[in-house]
């Protein structure tokens, strides 16, 4: 077999494999043998043997920097470009990969058209990514439902605690008017507990729809003053039992409106007030401040109790906090607060005050003005 026949057969094999061979000499890349048809789709000027590859590919030009280092090193060193896409003259796309190597002291560049095997790998990787995303979403939904289940338990326990505290205070109270107020609080707490029991079977769907809205956004509007008064009434027996005062600071409370469901806002405020009460010294006070900022309402609830340890502060609103123990913060309700606040595009956080004490803050957006 003559050299011409061997070169022709080798060129045919390379074309079937989708590989074009270029020799680097005098600063230019010249194709070895007849250019394959697919190469001419990208570079129409490369039509004859020894044709020079034009420098019209930004990706390839960038790779040639690494290729020259490889050729300078020589030996068995190789450099791969990784896959990239070039556009043909008719608007289609071809996936390519370049390899730089040295053979017999000659700098060689192999340009490979990636075919069905590459597309299969790419499809497999895409499906793997989609599977991971689906798993993450499912895991997130399971975590939310787990948190909501614990929140139901917390709500039922809170209602029962209100009844017990009210009855204990009635035993010590002599004022008929005050006794009537405590009886109404106890009665309302039992009604709330009964409502929770009746709704426990479908609470997950109702809670998630309420948090996200039917189209994935929270569109409810609530008057802040109503939610504050409802939360204040919810925690009144516990505050009275411990002798702690609740002091409101701010102006225009009844004119402030926030873009959040009223039930969820009342629960968030009640939870933060209960956490502040747990930390506050007996006979002291808890402060609830509110102020209007640009397009949002900032709510701050502060106490003068001991600051939370750093290890608790780091995960106060995360699922990892469920593993922490101790009476200083009720972690599961705080997770509900985070979910409820973030789903209406708000923010929630905690600050340890320099002078001592703790502050929980909530930033809630105001309703968008009608167009």
Image (cartoon, helix red, strand yellow):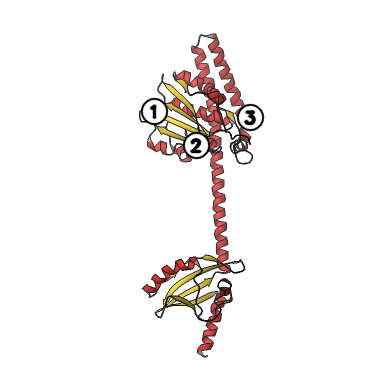
Residue 366 is left or right of residue 354, and the answer is: right
Give above or below for 116 relative to 265: below
Q: Nearer the viewer, mark 1 or mark 3?
A: 1
- Label 3 packing within 10 angstroms: few (<14), some (14-19), many (20+): few
Question: Does the rendering let one see residue 328?
Answer: no
Q: Secondary structure at mark 2?
A: strand
Cα separation, mark 3 vs mark 2, equals 32 Å
For marks 2 and 1, the one nearer the N-term is 2
The percent position of residue 308, horizontal first and vertical second, equals: 39, 32
Give above or below for 203 relative to 51: above
- Label 2 packing within 10 angstroms: few (<14), some (14-19), many (20+): some
Q: Nearer the viewer, mark 2 or mark 1?
A: 2
Q: Residue under circle 2?
A: 347
Q: Residue under circle 3?
A: 198
The percent position of residue 26, horizontal first and vertical second, equals: 42, 78
Q: Residue under circle 1?
A: 357
For marks 1 and 3, the one nearer the N-term is 3
Between 284 and 192, the residue placed more toward the observer is 284
For marks 3 and 2, the one nearer the N-term is 3
Total number of numbered discs in the rendering: 3
The percent position of residue 150, horizontal first and vertical second, equals: 53, 34
Between 20 and 61, the residue placed more toward the observer is 61
């Amino acid at each position: 077999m003559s050299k011409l026949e061997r070169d022709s057969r080798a060129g045919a094999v390379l074309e079937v494999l989708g590989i074009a061979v270029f020799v680097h000499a005098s600063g230019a890349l010249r194709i070895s043998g007849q250019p394959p048809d697919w190469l001419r789709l990208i570079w129409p000027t490369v039509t004859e043997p020894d044709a020079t590859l034009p420098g019209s590919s930004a990706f390839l030009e960038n790779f040639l920097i690494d290729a020259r280092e490889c050729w300078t090193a020589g030996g068995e060193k190789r450099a791969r470009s990784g896959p990239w896409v070039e556009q043909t003259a008719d608007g289609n796309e071809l996936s390519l990969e370049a390899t730089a190597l040295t053979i017999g002291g000659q700098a060689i560049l192999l340009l490979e058209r990636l075919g069905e095997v590459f597309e299969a790998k790419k499809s497999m990787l895409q499906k793997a990514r989609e599977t991971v995303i689906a798993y993450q979403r499912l895991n997130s939904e399971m975590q939310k439902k787990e948190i909501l289940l614990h929140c139901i338990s917390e709500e039922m326990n809170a209602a029962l605690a209100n009844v017990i505290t009210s009855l204990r205070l009635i035993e010590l109270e002599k004022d008929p008017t005050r006794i009537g107020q405590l009886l109404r609080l106890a009665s309302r707490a039992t009604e709330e507990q009964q409502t929770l029991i009746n709704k426990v079977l479908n609470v997950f769907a109702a809670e998630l729809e309420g948090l996200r809205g039917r189209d994935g956004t929270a569109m409810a509007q609530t008057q802040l003053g109503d939610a504050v008064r409802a939360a204040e009434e919810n925690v009144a027996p516990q505050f009275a039992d411990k002798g702690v005062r609740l002091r409101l600071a701010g102006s225009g409370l009844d004119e402030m409106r926030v873009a959040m469901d009223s039930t969820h806002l009342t629960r968030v405020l009640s939870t933060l007030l209960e956490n502040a009460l747990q930390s506050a010294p007996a006979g002291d006070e808890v402060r609830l401040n509110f102020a209007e900022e640009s397009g949002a309402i900032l709510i701050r609830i502060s106490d003068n109790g001991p600051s939370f340890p750093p290890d608790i502060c780091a995960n106060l609103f995360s699922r990892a906090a469920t593993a922490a123990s101790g009476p200083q913060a009720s972690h599961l309700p705080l997770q509900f607060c985070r979910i409820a606040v973030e789903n209406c595009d708000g923010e929630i956080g905690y600050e340890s005050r320099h002078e001592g004490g703790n502050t929980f803050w909530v930033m809630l957006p105001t309703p968008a003005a009608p167009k």
